[in-house]
Image (cartoon, rainbow, N blue to C red):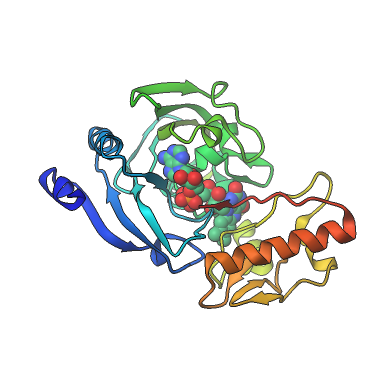
Amino acid sequence: MIKDFFKENNIEFISEVNLRDYNTYHIDSKALGMVFPSSIEELVTIIKYLKENNINYKFLGNGSNVILSKEYYDLIFIKLDKLNNYKVEGTTVIVESGVSLIKLSLDCAKLGLTGLEFMCALPGYMGSSVAMNAGAYNSSIGDVLVSAKVLNDKLEVITMTNKELEFKYRDSFLKHHRDYICLEATLKLEKGNPEEIYELMAKRQTKRIESQPLEYPSAGSVFRNPEGLFAGELIEKCGLKGTNINGAEVSQKHANFIINKGGAKGEDIIKLINLIKEKVYDKYKVELILEQEII
Ligand SMILES: Cc1cc2nc3c(=O)[nH]c(=O)nc-3n(C[C@H](O)[C@H](O)[C@H](O)COP(=O)(O)OP(=O)(O)OC[C@H]3O[C@@H](n4cnc5c(N)ncnc54)[C@H](O)[C@@H]3O)c2cc1C
């Protein structure tokens, strides 16, 4: 029935999708389906259909901040990969939600636009990263975003200002209202020198390669840094580096990363997370807060 609807409407759909390649932990998991709208109109058609038929759905960006805890999801993942255009008007860049942050930051560097250097190693898409106010090096999306085009809970396309999006550290209005979907972001950048921008990006990338286990599947930092402390340092001092549960391992290179050494399931990652939380709390009385989202 679902398959027929998408076929009739000429919308790309994968039935019984394997999610391994759609999450950066490379967790093996399956779902009822995955759908790829190519316009906002198609997206609205899809959501209306799913709601009318009581079919659950969940948006997925590049899957670089999620832990797939189930082996099977009885829901449809909606991917906005086809909404992946952006346009540049002077120092303003209007970016659709399926644009890769890494590509955008490199393209803007080439154009001599500064402000997105912090994004050059963030493997997320624009829309999801607005919701999570992704950032690095004391900068985040909320610092450069003027406004966003959002699909609200009534399926109306509205514009939300920076203020209305209530950006905080790795947090925004959208993160607490999952039925509000970011469709497009308008960013305000500044003119800069391409060589200097590239140089800064290259320096940061080298530092990341040295300090983070980028050679293994992961979803970046597992915990937020507690105020004035470093989560990685606390985990390391508890002697947890290298702790492994069925392939999910606390990285030897950076203790705030859990890597998939092969075959780890979401439940193994969650067990390891709970173990880390327990040990850090026992030793330091600090409650670590998860930065990744368990689906
Ligand atoms: C090696 C590595 C390094 C990383 N370094 C950093 C870092 O330095 N800083 C940092 O902040 N993050 C970092 N991350 C985490 C991650 O890349 C970011 O959080 C990124 O913003 C997540 O984007 P995504 O597209 O992968 O989102 P996903 O993980 O696919 O989704 C995240 C959430 O957003 C929701 N969502 C999806 N699309 C939309 C939409 N259009 N509108 C609203 N909600 C939506 C999803 O339903 C989900 O709840 C890192 C990850 C990795 C693997």
The answer to whether residue 251 of the structure is visible from this angle is yes
Residue placed farthest to the front in the image? Answer: 54
The answer to whether residue 109 of the structure is visible from this angle is no
Camera-side residue: 84 or 251?
A: 251
Locate residue 212, reporting x and y percent: 65, 66
Q: How many marks?
A: 0
Camera-side residue: 185 or 270?
A: 270
Camera-side residue: 215 or 113?
A: 215
Measured along the vertical axis of the image, is residue 138 above or below residue 21?
above
Left or right, 173 with respect to 157, comes to: right
Measured along the vertical axis of the image, is residue 173 above or below residue 20?
above
Identify the residue shown where x is 20% and y is 49%.
2
Locate residue 39, reporting x and y percent: 25, 37
Locate residue 202, reporting x and y percent: 58, 58
Camera-side residue: 53 or 151?
A: 53
Identify the residue shown where x is 78% and y is 64%.
235
Measured along the vertical axis of the image, is residue 70 above or below residue 6?
below
Locate residue 103, reporting x and y percent: 43, 51
Left or right, 17 with respect to 121, comes to: left
